[in-house]
Image: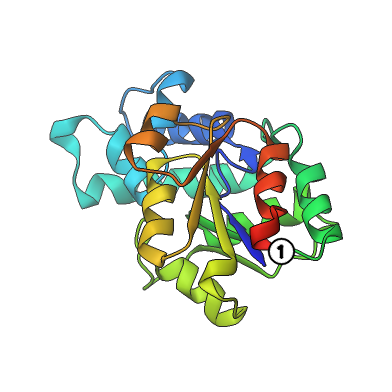
């Protein structure tokens, strides 16, 4: 069995560092910053889309997105761990899954180098089947290509795959990939978004994810 996790809002609470880095980029390029509380609705579709969303509507063009990225990437890379931390119970969940012989992977819309550094920093003791972020030439979620890439590298029957995420993007990704979706309520998006996108399961604790993975029909 394989459990694939989204990263931001599912394994790690990254919102404060993302907000700080984005606001720095906005300020450096002369655009107004946003309150941290606004960022859960800006993130979720990759860094480029984040830069587009934070711009004033009449200033959303490729040139301005590139200007923001020039400031965002170096700042974020230098401050990945300032406020970011795992959600309560996540390290224990990952260890329990592995102890039961269940493989784990990451599928994120965050760029690959940042995903690798965050995973290595916060979960150094976990043996990951795959750690995938956004890479050039591969569409971001909800396109299912990232899941297909993981399954290509770590072949697993789809009926034995669970995809865990906190947003509608994750639920749609799982459905398009043909795997079971588990929506978590501790992340960036409201439970209603998970329901509206027809998550197969909706859970409020990491322990509930473990329960689904260990359910008799899946073992």
Q: Is residue 88 visible?
A: yes
**Is residue 193 shown left or right of residue 59?**
right
User: Which residue is under mark 1?
Assistant: 219
Helix, strand or loop at mark 1: loop
Q: Quadrant of the N terminus?
A: bottom right
* Front-most of residues 36 and 76: 36
Q: Position of residue 157 (x, y in %)?
A: 56, 76
**For residue 172, above or below residue 132:** above
**Is residue 64 shown left or right of residue 59?**
right
- Kindly identify the residue that appears in the image at 37 percent across and 42 percent down: 50
**Label 1: how many Cα within 10 Å (few below 14, some 14–19, many 20+):** few
Q: Position of residue 102 (x, y in %)?
A: 74, 63
- Kindly identify the residue that appears in the image at 69 percent across and 70 percent down: 129
* Front-most of residues 85 and 19: 85
Residue 144: quadrant of the picture: bottom left
Residue 213: quadrant of the picture: bottom right
| Extreme-left residue of the structure | 58
């Amino acid at each position: 069995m394989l459990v694939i996790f989204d990263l931001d809002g599912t394994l790690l609470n990254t919102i404060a560092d993302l907000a700080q880095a984005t606001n720095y980029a906005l300020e450096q390029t002369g655009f107004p910053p946003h309150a941290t509380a606004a960022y859960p609705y800006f993130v979720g579709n990759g860094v480029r889309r984040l830069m587009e969303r934070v711009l004033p509507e009449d200033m959303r063009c490729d040139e301005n997105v590139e200007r923001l990225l020039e400031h965002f990437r170096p700042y974020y890379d230098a401050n990945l761990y300032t406020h970011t931390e795992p959600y309560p119970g996540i390290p224990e969940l990952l260890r329990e899954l592995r102890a039961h012989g269940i493989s784990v992977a990451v599928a994120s819309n965050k760029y690959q180098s940042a995903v690798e550094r965050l995973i290595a920093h916060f979960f150094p003791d976990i043996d990951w089947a795959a750690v995938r972020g956004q890479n050039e030439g591969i569409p971001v979620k909800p396109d299912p290509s990232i899941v297909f890439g993981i399954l290509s590298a770590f072949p697993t029957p789809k009926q034995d795959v669970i995809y865990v995420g906190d947003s509608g993007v994750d639920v749609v990704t799982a459905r398009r990939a043909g795997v079971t979706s588990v929506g978590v309520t501790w992340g960036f998006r409201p439970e209603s978004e998970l329901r509206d996108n027809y998550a197969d399961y909706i859970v409020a604790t990491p322990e509930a994810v473990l329960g689904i993975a260990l359910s008799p029909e899946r073992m």
